[in-house]
Image (cartoon, grey):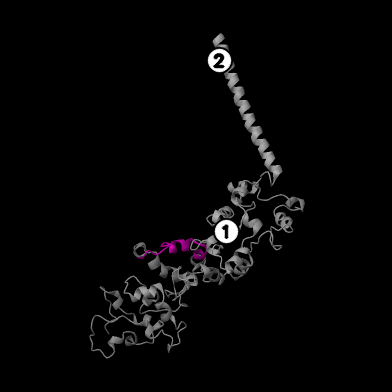
Amino acid sequence: MCHSAPYKERAALSIDIDRFAKSKHGKLRCVDCHRDLAGATLPHQLKLAKVDCAGCHRADNPFGAPDVKSSIAYEDTAHGRAAAKGDPDAPRCATCHGDHYVGGPSDPASSVYRTNIPITCGRCHNDSALVGRHKIPKGEALKFYQNSVHGRALKEKGLTISAVCTDCHGVHDIRVGADPRSSVSRPHIPDTCGKCHSGILKSYLTGIHGQDFKKGVKDAPICTDCHGEHTIFAPDEPSSSVNPIHIAKTCSTCHENTRIERTFGLPASRLATFLDSYHGIANTYGDTTVANCATCHGAHDILPSSDPRSSISKRNLPTTCGRCHPGAGVNFAKGSIHVLPSREKDREVYWVRMFYKLFIGGLVCAFLGYIFLDMLSRRRKRAEA
């Protein structure tokens, strides 16, 4: 009788009875949630107690909701602990699910429907003031996500199978990345990404990076090290960190790190020797068809040359080179790939380079000497005249 009337000052007091009836809570009575009003005399008191959703959404939930432990999971998270301390910014049940018109995840109008989840999370995580107050990392996550391959697939193409916030961060058990239990903590990221990319996860775990990861090597690269987090783009997009133009830079993050090179005995100057080759020079000038790191070493199932399964093992090099150079045989792949000439290794290249340095240097000096003598001769002739 009272709350069906429009309240201009406080719109939340106006309840659309028909819309409420269609919601998940449509069969509940008002006092099932507002329990402090049970048996109250009307008109009731103005200030009501906060609704306790955990009263129903607990482990022994009699209504059989799909996530019966949601309240327990929430209480042990950064959101839940902040709410328990009375933080006004902390998201509570109604922040994400709404208050009177709670819809299920299968309802397109619901705030927790897959296409709506980024907007729901973004209400807080895209609020610069709130992000600043709580020092939340990656404050523009929504902006980055919406421009990523996942975000565009969801928004522009309507692909609801595309990853959304809750697929990576969890639903009610959202924890910060530093928490070892978090689905986005470093040890769990391959499994989190692998929920969708199962084939790639299997390939990655076969490779040397994945093998080291399983051994607990902290420096072993994982999905986000190469692909990014919220800024994930398809390999054919120019802004992607795994675009052919950027792959050398992405790989060199580890392979040009002297500490990592010393720790694992990795060969040095991989980036410099690549950039010094024809492939590297062409790649620097924007040629996306020329060979890059992934072309030869592979993308996810990278193996050392000592492994007979590796694409760069001596036995497989002719086949690997033959992808771009049809007819490449054993002799084609005999030479060094990353050439770092010295008197001990690749001596022929070293001495040829030394010869050309001396020859070209000497030639330049000879030309400069010739010019100097010519200028001196002209000055003498003018003086004699």
Gap in Å between the C-alphas at discs 1 and 2?
Answer: 64 Å
Tell me where residue 366 appears, x and y as whole percent.
63, 26
Is residue 363 shown left or right of residue 82? right
- The residue carrying pointer 1 sits among few (fewer than 14), some (14 to 19) or many (20 or more) residues within 10 Å by Cα, namely few
Mark 1 vs mark 2, foreground winner is 1
Is residue 3 shown left or right of residue 68? left
Tag 1, which secondary structure? Answer: helix
| Above or below: residue 213 compared with residue 355 | below
Tag shown at residue 103: none
Tag 2, which secondary structure? Answer: helix
Tag shown at residue 263: 1
Tell me where residue 385 appears, x and y as whole percent.
56, 8
Is residue 21 shown left or right of residue 355? left
Tell me where residue 181 appears, x and y as whole percent.
48, 73
Q: Which residue is mark 2?
A: 379
Q: Quadrant of residue 79?
A: bottom left
Residue that protrudes farthest toward the bottom in the picture: 39
- As for residue 142 lying within the magenta part, the answer is yes
Q: Nearer the viewer, residue 29 or 203?
A: 203
Q: Nearer the viewer, residue 361 or 318?
A: 361
> What's drawn in magenta, residue-wise?
134-152
Q: Nearer the viewer, residue 219 or 138?
A: 219
Q: Who's the residue at 62% across and 32% down the image?
A: 361
